[in-house]
């Protein structure tokens, strides 16, 4: 559906025409009926509890009102006011099913997520990032040795206000050639060096190319800025870009980790969880890997274990996840394998 997804673009780039037009263009976030249809393929599903195979823990309107915030109205400079205008129609679960072709899905033979540091990343807790990705997706994660910037293809880095700046394709080209083991489903690079995707852009936080299942993102603009912690922002950007490699597009239905962002404040305002629309997409995308214990309850259990282990950094996320588990346990049907797993019982994560 999109060869490249550019997550963040500053308002000061060449895309200045957005400042000359009304930022919303008359667009309003989808209402509750549209949000329910996006996840359940039926606006009636939220009132009945389930429809078209959509489980109650994902499509129940009352439950979703309790845990998920609808997408906020647009402000000038936001992603959907500028470069993301073409994405305003959103990607429903039904559209995701049509776009997520079998050849692009994770399988038992091809399920590993490969993470590749580029340049000096000593200030990043790479082990925590790998642990978070494993909890988020339930798939094996391999952390490779760092790749020196000098190993990348031309052009040479250019200069920005954040120091050296690398062309993103010089990284993704390297990943395709050297960092895609046979068992890998996708490969994602991360770096402390600033990035740009095209000479016309002044920077980008991250990109993902689902056609070859590689991507990269930078932490350079997260350091020394007010707001969320470096680890929180790094985890959020990492699973956002990896989500694109599973064919999950930017979210327009709820405040969600898959929201596009055009500036750091907009990125920080997105929560570190998936909305029900994208949760259903991810479970569908991972259905080809039974060994990963892909059920809603198992996934939340894994995430809760990670959040609790990180102490105060993710205290709010731990509280949200704990409450979400209890609420979904109460509404999920006993035979609902999408929540409880094939055994019919909730299963946790042992690491």
Image: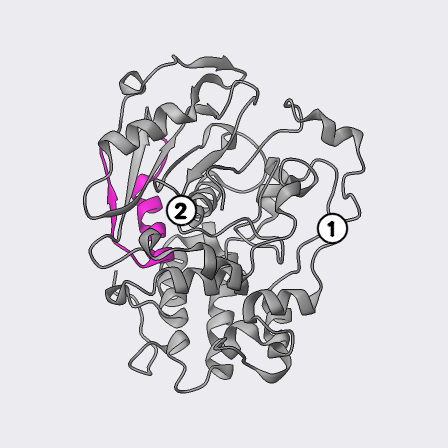
Name the one closer to the observer, 344 or 161: 344
Q: Are marks 1 and 2 in contact (CB under 8 Å)?
A: no
Residue 160, image x, y percentages: 52, 16
Label number found at residue 170: none
Q: Residue at x 65, y 74 (%)?
A: 43
- N-term-proximal mark, 1 vs 2: 1
- State left or right for residue 256 relative to residue 298: right
Figure coloring = one colour
Q: Position of residue 120 (x, y in %)?
A: 33, 24
Q: Secondary structure at mark 2?
A: helix
SS of the residue at dot 1?
Answer: loop
Label 1 vs label 2, nearer the camera: 2
Most foreground residue, 98 or 139: 98
Part of the protein shown in magenta: 122-145
Which numbered disc covers residue 73?
A: 1
Which residue appears at 78% of the width and 43% of the height? 25
Q: Nearer the viewer, residue 245 or 212?
A: 212
Side of 343 where 25 appears, left or right: right
């Amino acid at each position: 559906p999109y060869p490249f997804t550019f997550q963040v673009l500053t308002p000061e780039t060449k895309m200045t025409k957005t400042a000359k037009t009304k930022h919303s263009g008359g667009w309003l976030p989808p209402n509750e009926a549209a949000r329910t249809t996006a996840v359940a393929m039926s606006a009636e599903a939220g009132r009945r509890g389930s429809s078209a195979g959509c489980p109650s823990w994902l499509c129940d309107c009352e439950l979703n009102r309790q845990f998920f915030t609808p997408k906020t109205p647009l402000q000038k400079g936001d992603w959907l006011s500028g470069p993301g205008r073409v994405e305003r129609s959103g990607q429903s679960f039904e559209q995701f099913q049509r776009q997520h072709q079998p050849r692009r899905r994770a399988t038992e033979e091809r399920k590993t997520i490969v993470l590749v540091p580029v340049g000096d990343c000593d200030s990043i807790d790479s082990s925590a990032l790998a642990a978070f990705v494993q909890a988020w997706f339930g798939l094996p994660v391999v952390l490779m040795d760092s790749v020196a910037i000098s190993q990348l293809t031309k052009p040479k880095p250019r200069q920005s206000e954040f120091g050296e700046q690398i062309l993103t394709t010089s990284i993704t080209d390297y990943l395709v050639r050297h960092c895609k083991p046979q068992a890998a489903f996708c490969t994602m690079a991360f770096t402390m060096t600033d990035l740009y995707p095209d000479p016309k852009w002044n920077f980008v936080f991250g990109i993902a190319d689902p056609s070859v299942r590689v991507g990269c993102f930078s932490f350079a603009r997260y350091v020394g800025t007010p707001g969320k912690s470096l680890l929180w922002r790094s985890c959020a950007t990492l699973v956002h870009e990896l989500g694109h490699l599973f064919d999950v597009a930017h979210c327009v239905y709820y405040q969600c980790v898959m929201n596009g962002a055009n500036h750091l404040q907009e990125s920080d305002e997105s929560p570190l969880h998936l909305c029900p629309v994208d949760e259903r997409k991810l479970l569908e995308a991972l259905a080809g890997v039974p060994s990963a214990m892909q059920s809603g309850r198992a996934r939340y259990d894994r995430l809760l274990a990670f959040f609790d282990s990180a102490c105060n950094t993710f205290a709010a996320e731990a509280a949200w996840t704990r409450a979400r588990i209890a609420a979904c346990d109460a509404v999920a049907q006993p035979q609902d394998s999408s929540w409880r797993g094939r055994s019919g019982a909730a299963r946790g994560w042992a690491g």
